[in-house]
């Protein structure tokens, strides 16, 4: 096996039925080491692991990983897409209006979808996505919250 392969990432790929490649293991490992990482952050981490990888290749790998449930894509309004490896539960997010920091928030009530709509319009609902907005502790310390 190639020395740049991250073995835990390779095992996750195999378990999800994906072929193990250096770009896939590097992107998954980079996503795992980040916290709600952007594509640029993941690309930087992947390049540190394997050298050259195009941004398009990172997008392609992330799309494949999302399809098989190894990463989750979140898109807070007005922010670039972010990726996390906490999957399989129905947690939510809190986003700082000033700096864009993102943190996980547990479901307010029990299991997925953890909140019920007033009307489901015939849909079988299995997930709810809630985003809380505010100022992170660091931005609360700056004059007027430094809202950009």
Image (tube, grey):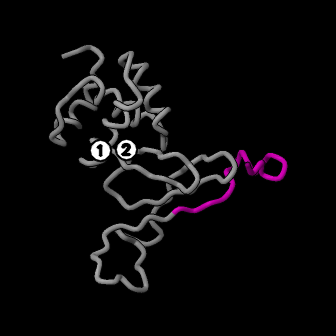
Identify residue for label 2: 85
Residue at 28% of width from left, 32% of height from top? 9
Q: Is residue 14 left or right of residue 145?
A: left
Residue 52 among magenta residues: no
Tell me the SS state at disc 1: loop
Identify residue for label 1: 70
Q: Position of residue 104 (x, y in %)?
A: 50, 53
Q: What is the magenta range?
A: 131-148
Residue at 31% of width from left, 55% of height from top? 88
Label located before the other in sequence (2 or 1): 1
Quadrant assignment for the N terminus? top left
Q: Is residue 116 above or below residue 90?
A: below
Tell me the SS state at disc 2: loop
Whole-Å distance between the Cαs marked 2 and 1? 6 Å
Q: Position of residue 110 (x, y in %)?
A: 39, 71
Residue at 42% of width from left, 75% of height from top? 115
Instruction: Pick whichever, 138 or 27, lies toward us.
Output: 27
Q: Position of residue 28 (x, y in %)?
A: 33, 34
Instruction: Pick whichever, 74 or 132, lies toward us.
Output: 74
């Amino acid at each position: 096996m190639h020395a740049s392969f991250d073995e835990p990432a390779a095992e996750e790929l195999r378990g999800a039925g994906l072929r193990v490649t250096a770009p896939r293991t590097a992107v998954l490992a980079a996503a795992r080491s980040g916290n709600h990482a952007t594509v640029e952050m993941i690309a930087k981490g992947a390049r540190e692991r394997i050298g050259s990888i195009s941004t398009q290749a990172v997008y392609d790998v992330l799309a494949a990983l999302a399809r098989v449930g190894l990463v989750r894509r979140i898109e807070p309004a007005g922010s670039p897409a972010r990726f996390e490896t906490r999957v399989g539960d129905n947690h939510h997010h809190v986003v700082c209006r000033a700096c864009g920091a993102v943190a996980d928030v547990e479901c307010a009530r029990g299991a997925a979808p953890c909140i019920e709509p007033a009307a489901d319009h015939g849909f079988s609902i299995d997930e709810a996505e809630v985003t809380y907005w505010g100022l992170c502790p660091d931005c609360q310390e700056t004059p007027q919250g430094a809202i950009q």
